[in-house]
Image (spheres, rainbow, N blue to C red):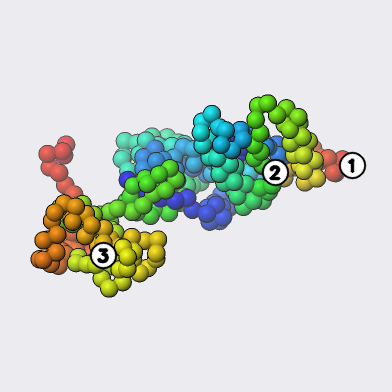
């Protein structure tokens, strides 16, 4: 639901950072999260928002550099995809031009 | 419990796409347990519908709620003073709940948001299997506690049939033969002699063959 809320609010993308598989404090929590992320991606695909805007990554709390790398990777990916259709629609509804239109 | 599964979102969108306001109504009963239609599913569906409408440039209002049970009047009455605000309701309850809403709110379209599948059990998280077809004349006492109506693909009263092989049903290698299960269970109970006397033909009048059913328990009536 948090993923849906973020996307509904207009986030261009969201990634979920779970512990390494097999290393979850809640045992299977990260595996369940992985399935839920896949479920949300499917919904986003079906409603035209694009499931690729949501992703799941696994890393440990001690992998700061990896976190930064993932954040950069995700940012680049989302930047290539452009603004979320929800954000564009919200701006249009508010009478504000989208980034592309302003340019 | 009653097991259901969510309808594809495209099907729901098709039902509500021309409306101005929609209420997604979950049910806190069986469909919550089988993760098809509780509050969480209502929130996710409502959010998805809002995003869909937003992209279409429509300001359709989509809100969500969840009732304790949609199969009891005191609970569905909680919608009495809210329902006028919406053009339609997408009910995530089982078919009984959808119909009960439709009976109460006669001028309001009530759409099903789930497909109601069967009466079953939770095998493990995320997996449910059928156990009962509500035939109205339980014979579990004679079949070792395993129902041939629900577990045998042919609903045979006396089995197994020739399609049973190595404990599996001919419809699929994944499906256990109900009568094989019954045999194994009766063997454990030391009751294999039950197979010497065939079960009588089943009286299906207590099932759907007798038309829509009704139960009256006078002692419980007001």
* Dot 3 crowding, Cα within 10 Å, few <14, some 14–19, many 20+: some
Q: Which mark is residue B155?
A: 3
Q: Is label 2 in a helix, a strand or a loop?
A: helix
Residue at the image position 69 percent from the left and 47 percent from the top: A52
- Compared across the picture, whether B68 is left or right of A56 comes to left
State which chain disc 2 sits on.
A
Can residue B177 be seen here? The reply is yes
Q: Which mark is residue A53?
A: 2
Q: Between residues B121 and A26, which one lies in front from this camera angle? A: A26
* Dot 1 crowding, Cα within 10 Å, few <14, some 14–19, many 20+: few
- Compared across the picture, whether B65 is left or right of B29 comes to right
Q: Which is nearer the N-term, disc 1 or disc 2?
A: 2
Q: Is label 3 in a helix, a strand or a loop?
A: loop
State which chain disc 3 sits on.
B
Q: Nearer the viewer, mark 1 or mark 3?
A: 3
Residue at the image position 62 percent from the left and 52 percent from the top: A46
Q: Are marks 1 and 3 on the same chain?
A: no
Q: Between residues A22 and B26, which one lies in front from this camera angle? A: A22
* Dot 2 crowding, Cα within 10 Å, few <14, some 14–19, many 20+: many
Marks 1 and 2, how far apart at CA: 23 Å
Above-or-below relation of A3 to B129: above
Task: Using the rendered view, name the quadrant where residue B159 is placed.
Answer: bottom left
Q: Are marks 1 and 2 on the same chain?
A: yes
Q: Residue B120 location in percent, x, y?
A: 33, 50
Instruction: Tell me the residue that label 1 is attached to.
Output: A103
Above-or-below relation of B125 to B111: above
């Amino acid at each position: 639901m948090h993923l849906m809320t973020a996307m509904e609010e207009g986030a261009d993308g969201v990634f979920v950072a779970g512990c390494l598989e097999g290393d979850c404090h809640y045992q299977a929590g990260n595996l369940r999260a992985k399935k839920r992320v896949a479920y949300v991606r499917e919904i986003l695909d079906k409603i035209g928002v694009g499931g690729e805007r949501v992703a799941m990554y696994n890393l440990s709390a001690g992998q700061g550099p990896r976190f930064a790398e993932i954040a950069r990777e995700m940012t680049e990916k989302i930047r290539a995809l452009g603004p979320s259709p929800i954000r564009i629609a919200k701006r249009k509804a508010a009478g504000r031009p989208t980034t592309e239109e302003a340019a | 419990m009653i097991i259901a599964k969510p309808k594809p979102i495209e099907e729901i969108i098709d039902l509500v796409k021309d409306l101005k306001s929609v209420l997604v109504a979950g049910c806190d009963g069986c469909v919550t347990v089988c993760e098809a239609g509780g509050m969480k599913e209502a929130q996710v569906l409502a959010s998805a519908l809002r995003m869909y409408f937003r992209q279409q440039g429509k300001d359709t209002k989509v809100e969500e709620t969840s009732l304790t049970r949609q199969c009891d009047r005191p609970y569905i009455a909680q919608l009495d003073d809210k329902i006028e605000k919406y053009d339609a309701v997408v009910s995530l309850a089982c078919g009984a709940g959808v119909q009960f809403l439709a009976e109460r709110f006669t001028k309001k379209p009530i759409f099903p948001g789930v497909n109601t599948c069967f009466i079953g059990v939770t095998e493990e998280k995320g997996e449910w299997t059928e156990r009962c077809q509500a035939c109205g004349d339980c014979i579990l006492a004679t079949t070792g506690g395993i129902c041939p109506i629900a577990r045998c693909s042919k609903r045979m009263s006396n089995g197994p049939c020739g399609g049973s092989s190595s404990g599996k049903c001919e419809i699929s290698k994944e499906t256990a033969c109900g009568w094989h299960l019954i045999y194994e269970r009766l063997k454990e109970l030391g009751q294999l002699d039950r197979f010497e006397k065939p079960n009588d033909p089943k009286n299906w009048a207590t099932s759907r063959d007798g038309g829509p059913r009704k139960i009256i328990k006078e002692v419980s009536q007001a």
